[in-house]
Image: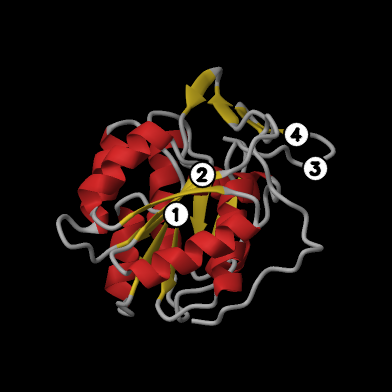
């Protein structure tokens, strides 16, 4: 991987209360965790590391990180199992999977398990840090610069400051990635958005031209936004997706 540090001119990200971002790095390669620890401390973040899944679970519950870098291949339980246990505990911390595997099925499996992003080894440190900054910006840690934080389409309301979503007055709980996808759809009402546009905006990269991840997350959103209600998220065959008032 490329040992490239981020530019010192890039603004620092902190939690909403001004305290350092907390990151947990989980990998059984000590040299890799040391390198990531150095890079993220350069960002001003507070870092904890773990070399196996059980240690990662213990630290995550005690440390309460704001973002997690999680290797899929671990010596005891794999990263997918770690994430499933964290989600079962109610932790919605954004997770970036780290693995040497390069198959599309592995990437989709990680995201389906509740992960938010994916980096394949070898990678550049600058790219990984940029991905993590993107995940944090999509979380509730930092305030948005939008001139109007509240977006309303029909009876669906999204607040970018509080990260709260309601439909017909009922709260809807979304993960960080689901929230970003819904925000993109709501900021472009009655406009057909292609899978490529969604990949570029929500994930900032594509999956080798494959768009299965978009279909997966659209399905997640429909179950939460449209379930038992008039449909708002529509598929335009051969073109993409559109959100409009019911």
- Of callouts 2 and 1, which one flags the residue occurring earlier in the amino acid sequence? 1
Tag 4 residue: 149
Tag 2 residue: 176
- Of callouts 2 and 3, which one flags the residue occurring earlier in the amino acid sequence? 3
Left or right of 156 on screen, residue 53: left
Is the C terminus in the top left, top right, bottom left or bottom right quadrant?
top right
Q: Is residue 181 visible?
A: yes
- Of callouts 1 and 3, which one flags the residue occurring earlier in the amino acid sequence? 1
Q: CA distance from mark 2 to mark 1?
A: 8 Å
How many callouts does the rendering have? 4
Tag 1 residue: 116
Residue 22 location, x and y as percent? 53, 43
Instruction: Look at the numbered discs 2 and 1 and tell me whether their residues touch, using CB distance below 8 Å.
Output: yes
Left or right of 160 on screen, residue 108: left
Badge 3 crowding class, 10 Å Cα cut-off, few under 14, some 14 to 19, many 20 or more, is: few
- Of callouts 4 and 2, which one flags the residue occurring earlier in the amino acid sequence? 4
Residue at disc 1, secondary structure = loop
- Of callouts 1 and 4, which one flags the residue occurring earlier in the amino acid sequence? 1
Mark 4 or 2: the one toward you:
2
Q: Residue at x 30, y 77 (%)?
A: 101
Tag 3 residue: 145
Q: CA distance from mark 1 to mark 4?
A: 23 Å
Instruction: Look at the numbered discs 2 and 3 and tell me whether their residues touch, using CB distance below 8 Å.
Output: no
Q: Residue at x 59, y 66 (%)?
A: 204
Q: Quadrant of residue 80?
A: bottom left
């Amino acid at each position: 991987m490329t040992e490239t540090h981020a530019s010192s001119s890039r603004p620092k990200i902190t939690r909403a209360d001004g305290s350092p971002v907390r990151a947990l790095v989980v990998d059984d390669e000590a040299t890799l965790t040391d390198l990531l620890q150095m890079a993220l401390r350069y960002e001003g973040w507070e870092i904890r590391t773990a070399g196996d899944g059980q240690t990662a679970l213990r630290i995550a519950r005690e440390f309460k990180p704001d973002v997690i870098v999680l290797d899929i291949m671990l010596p005891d339980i794999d990263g997918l199992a770690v994430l499933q246990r964290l989600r079962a505990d109610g932790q919605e911390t954004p997770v970036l999977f780290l693995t040497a595997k390069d198959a599309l099925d592995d990437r989709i499996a990680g995201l389906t398990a509740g992960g938010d992003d994916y980096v394949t080894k070898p990678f550049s440190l600058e790219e990984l840090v940029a991905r993590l900054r993107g995940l944090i910006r999509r979380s509730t840690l930092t305030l948005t610069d939008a001139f109007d934080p509240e977006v309303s389409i029909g009876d669906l309301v999204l607040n970018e400051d509080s990260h709260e979503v309601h439909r017909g007055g009922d709260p809807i709980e979304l993960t960080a990635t689901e929230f970003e996808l819904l925000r993109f759809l709501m900021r472009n009402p009655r406009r057909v958005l292609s899978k490529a546009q969604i990949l570029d905006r929500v994930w900032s990269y594509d999956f080798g031209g494959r768009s299965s991840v978009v279909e997966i997350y659209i399905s997640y959103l429909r179950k939460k936004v449209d379930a038992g209600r008039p449909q708002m998220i529509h598929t335009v065959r051969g073109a993409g997706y559109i959100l409009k008032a019911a």
